[in-house]
Structures are given as structure tokens and as C-alpha cells.
Image (cartoon, rainbow, N blue to C red):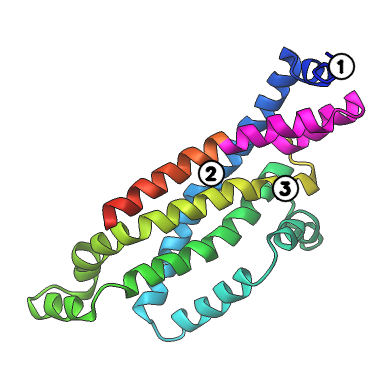
Amino acid sequence: MDVLAPFMEVYKLDNVKFLLEGFGVTLKVAAISIVLSFLIGGLIGTLRYARIPVVSPFLAVVVETIRNLPLLLIIFFAYFALPEIGIEMEITTAAIAALTVFESAMLSEIIRSGLNSIEKGQMEAARASGLNYIQTLRYIIMPQALRRMVPPIVSQFISLLKDTSLAVVIALPDLLHNGQIIYAQKGSYVIPVFIMVAFMYFIVNYALSLVARRLELKQT
């Protein structure tokens, strides 16, 4: 009974509700970041694929720079450094901005690689049949590339959801933050709290991984 006592104490209704509130913040931040990073990453990836003079090389430098920086550093920069130049954001906005910047760079590379995976002959054939570059990209190249890109994109979304936990360093009231508050109040009940936190992350991420796996099977 003594072994179960910490679990019984931690898993009271009020504590579970508090964890769910934090998980709601996690999902909100992740959802907004996913939408924004997909749109921005899609635009950047497409522009890099188009190889526009000056623009594409510039974006390549930006993307490679961001991809080789720790996400934690970008979070710190968004919340602590930007206010020094007059750009102040509250915690949730700073977390979304940092995640969006980082994940946009990651997704842009996935999208660029997906577009490059389509045989160049298809572009040439479509142009020869009278379609302009935009029409060819929209109707011929992009639909085929998207089917190949979906599994790695979903996998990146899973990583994004897990990466939201890094925003605990700026006190984002997410799942991990609320878990820390509970075990700080309860004393030594760390294991029961982290088991519950891990379970909540696992449920959502496992569901997304099943989606990614199913999509990969469809490609074979």
C-alpha cells in the first residue's frame, strides 16, 4: 500500500485536471506552430526548389543556419533577446515564434527534397505541352511530391510536439511545467508525475506515428 500511496496522492482529480490544462497548452502551441511552420516552410522549400537567383541562395543560408542551431537557443533568443531591440512577446507567443522558425527550416528542407525527388523529365514534358512553370509545379510536380513528403512531414510534426517541452525554460505553462509544479508541491512524488506526463505525450505521439507508418505503407 505504501508503494501505491504516491500514485494515489498524485493522481487525484485536481492534479489530473491541472496536468490536462498544461497538456491543452502544449497541444495549442504545437497546433499553431505546425500550421505556421508548414505554410512558411512550404513557401521557403518551394522557392529554394525554383532556384531563383539571389533569393534561393539567401534562403539556403538562412535555413542551414537555423537548422544548425539548438532550438533551446532560439527559444531563449525569442523571449530574452528580442525585447532588447523592442520586440516583446508573452511566453506563449515567444514559444510559438521560436518553434515556428525552427520547424519552418526543417520542413522547408523536407519539401525541397520532396520536390527534387520528382524526375526532371516530368517538368520538361509539362513545359513542352504548353504549361508554364507555375502550372507545372502546381498540377504536375507538387501533387506527386506531396505523397512522398507526407510521412516525413508527419514525423517532423511529432518532433515538434515533443519539442514544445523545451519551452519550460521560459515557464510556458505546458504539460511538463505543470508536472514540475505538482511534484514540487508534493515533495518526492517525481516518478508518478513523470509517468503521467510521459503517458500523455506517448498517447498523442504514438497516434501520429501510426498515421505516419500508414502513410509510408501507402507509398510502397
Image quarter of the C terminus? bottom left
> Distance from label 2 to label 1 (Cα)?
43 Å
Residue 26 painted magenta? no
Helix, strand or loop status at disc 3 = helix
Q: Which amino acid, mark 3?
A: Ala
- Give the residue drawn at x 62%, y 54%: 99
Asked if residue 174 can be seen in this view, the reply is no
- Give the residue drawn at x 53%, y 44%: 32
Query: Is 169 left or right of 131, judged from the image as shown?
Result: right
User: How far from the left and from the top, in percent, is residue 174?
Assistant: 70, 36
Q: Which residue is mark 3?
A: 167
- How dense is the environment of label 1, judged by Cα within 10 Å: few (below 14), some, or many (20 and up)? few
| Quadrant of residue 133 within the rendered picture | bottom left
Q: Which residue is mark 2?
A: 32
Q: Nearer the viewer, residue 166 or 92?
A: 166
Give the total number of marks visible in the rendering.
3
| Residue 2, label in figure | 1
User: How far from the left and from the top, in percent, is residue 145?
Assistant: 29, 64
Q: Nearer the viewer, mark 3 or mark 1?
A: 1
Name which of mark 3 and mark 1 comes first in the sequence.
Answer: 1
The stretch in magenta equals 175-202
Q: Nearer the viewer, mark 2 or mark 1?
A: 1
- Give the residue drawn at x 85%, y 28%: 189
Q: Is residue 103 above or below residue 186?
A: below
Name which of mark 2 and mark 1 comes first in the sequence.
Answer: 1
